[in-house]
Amino acid sequence: MKVSDILRVKGNTLFTVTPDEPLASAVNVMADKDIGSLVVMEHGDLVGMLTFREVIVALVANGGQVGGTLVRKAMDDHPVTCTLETDLDEIRRIMLERHARYMPVMDKRMLMGVISFYDVAKAVVDSQNFENKMLKAYIRDWPAEDESSSS
């Protein structure tokens, strides 16, 4: 299974923010849309990711307030990315190694979507459930040994 398979099931709704927007506005979008990340775009290019992790770090640094902090100050400006052709096993490895809960999917310089750790876990479970159904159907339909031919 590849990243393109996950995006096909997930859909292509993307939420973005610019680096010069107030962090408070970005947090409001995240809360309103019930999402854990925003892709930070500037002049059509991916320049960062803002996740709840970066928001919490900014809150702690500012004494529990976002104040006038800009997204640029809080965002991860070197997010790990993948392509549509990246294999699911590779995504799992990268996400675990980098503690990345969200990963932008790029096609050269074009943002194609974002996959989350949840999306990856769901794809793995769905794939395992499908394999289990196929195995059970195979076993159920396995021809019984013909007892009459043994006499």
Image (tube, rainbow, N blue to C red):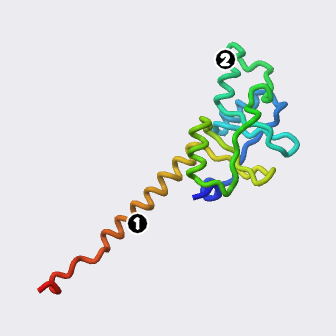
In this view, the residue farthest toward the right is 43
Q: Is residue 146 visible?
A: yes
Q: Tell me where residue 128 appears, x and y as whole percent.
A: 45, 56
The C terminus lies in which quarter of the figure? bottom left
Disc marking residue 60: 2
**In the figure, 123 relative to 70: above or below?**
below
**Residue 116 or 96: which is nearer the viewer?**
96
* Residue 34 at least partly seen: no
Q: Quadrant of residue 63?
A: top right
**Residue 73 at what x, y percent from top left?**
78, 25
Q: On screen, 75 above or below 96?
A: above
Q: Residue furthest left?
A: 151
Rendered position, 76 above or below 44: above
Q: Name the residue at 64% across, 47% down.
A: 115
| In front of the other: 39 or 139 | 139
Along the horizontal axis of the image, is 88 left or right of 82? left
Residue 4, given in percent of the width and then of the height, sits at 65, 58
Determine the residue positioned at 75% across, 36% down.
78
Considering only order in the chain, which callout, 2 or 1, is on the residue closer to the N terminus? 2
State the separation of the CA atoms marked 1 and 2.
50 Å
The residue mark sitting in front, 1 or 2, is 1
User: Dot 2 lies on which element?
Assistant: helix
Q: Which residue matches tag 1?
A: 134
Q: Amino acid at mark 2?
A: Val
